Amino acid sequence: MNSLTIPHNDIAFSREGVGDRAIVFQHGFLDDQYVWNPVIAELTASRYEIVRLDLAGFGDRSAANGPFTYDRFAADLAAVVDALDKPFVLVGHSMAGPIVELVAAGRHDRALGVVLLSPIPMAGAGTPDEAFEMFRSLGEIGPEHLRGFRQQTAPLAPEDELDRLVAVAEKLRPEVVRTVADVWNNGHPAGERPSGFSGPLLVLRGGEDVLVTAEVVASAVVARFPSATITVTVIDKAGHWPHLEQPSAVAAAINGFLAELAP
C-alpha cells in the first residue's frame, strides 16, 4: 500500500493494487481510513485499484485545520479522485454518504457508481438539540463511555477493533467532534432537492441499525434519487457499522455491485 499526498495540501490518501478503475472508501464519524480493512480484505474485483483517505480532523489528519463542513470534505475527496484520473466507484459510511454523493454528482463522466453504507441523509439526521448533545460530547467522555457507545451501535464488532477505534477517537479534538457532529445532524442544502447523481446506487443498511432505519433509508435517502438505478440490501445481524460487524456480507454486496457495472 502506497501513501500519496495532494500537492500544496494536507490531503493524504492510500493506494493499493492496480486497475483501470478505482474504488474509493470514505469513512464516517469518529473513524479513520483503516476501518475498511476487513471489507477490503475480501474484495475480488480485479479491475479496481483500492483507495482510501481520512477526513480532515480525523485519523492521520486529526491535526488538520478547518473549516469542517460537507463542502470542504467533498472538495478533499474530489481532489483525490481528480488526482487518480480514472473512472471510480465511491463508498461512504454514515456521514460520508452525503460526501460521496456530492462528489459523484459533480463528476458524471467518471463516476461509475456509489455505495452508501448506513447513510445519514443529505438533509441531516435532524435529532433534537437536547438529545443530540450526547453525540456532540463524544470527544470529551473518555474511553470507557466511547466503548459503550460503540458497543450499543455496533454490538457485533470485534473486540480488538472496538479497542482500536476507541484509541483513534481519543486523539480527536473535542471542538472538531462537536463541529462535525452538527454538520451531519444539520445536513447540506442539497438535501432539499433531488440528487444530481443518476447512476447505479447500492444502499446497504444494518438490519439492527437504530440510527438509520428502513424508514429513513426509504424516505430520506432513496427517495432523493429518482433517476438512479437503486439496489437496497439489508445486512443481517448488524447495527450502524456493518463493515465491522459483518464484513464478509458487505464485501459480497460490493463485489456483486462492481461486477454488474458496465464494462
Image (tube, grey):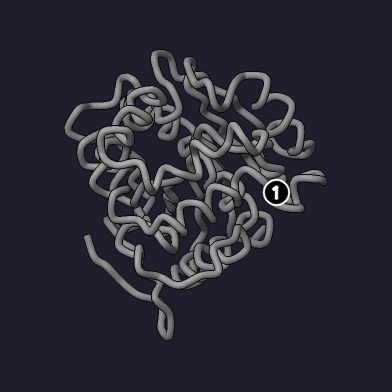
Could you tell me the amino acid type at mark 1?
Phe
Q: Quadrant of residue 8?
A: bottom left
Residue 177: where, in percent of width, then height?
A: 46, 52
Count of numbered badges drawn on the protein? 1
Q: Is residue 151 depicted above or below 191 in this figure?
A: above
Q: Label 1 neighbourhood size at 10 Å, few (<14), some (14-19), many (20+)?
A: many
- Residue 258, percent across and down? 47, 39
Residue 77 point in image, percent of width and height = 50, 62
Depicted 140 relative to depicted 152: above or below: below
Question: From the viewer's perspective, is 61 left or right of 229?
Answer: left
The image quadrant of residue 150 is top left
Residue indicated by mark 1: 197
Q: Position of residue 151 (x, y in %)?
A: 33, 24
Residue at the location (52% across, 58% down)? 87
Give the structural element (helix, strand or loop) at label 1: loop
Taking the spot 46% from the left edge, 36% from the top edge, the residue there is 259
Quarter of the image with the N terminus is: bottom left
Q: Residue at x 50, y 52 (%)?
A: 178
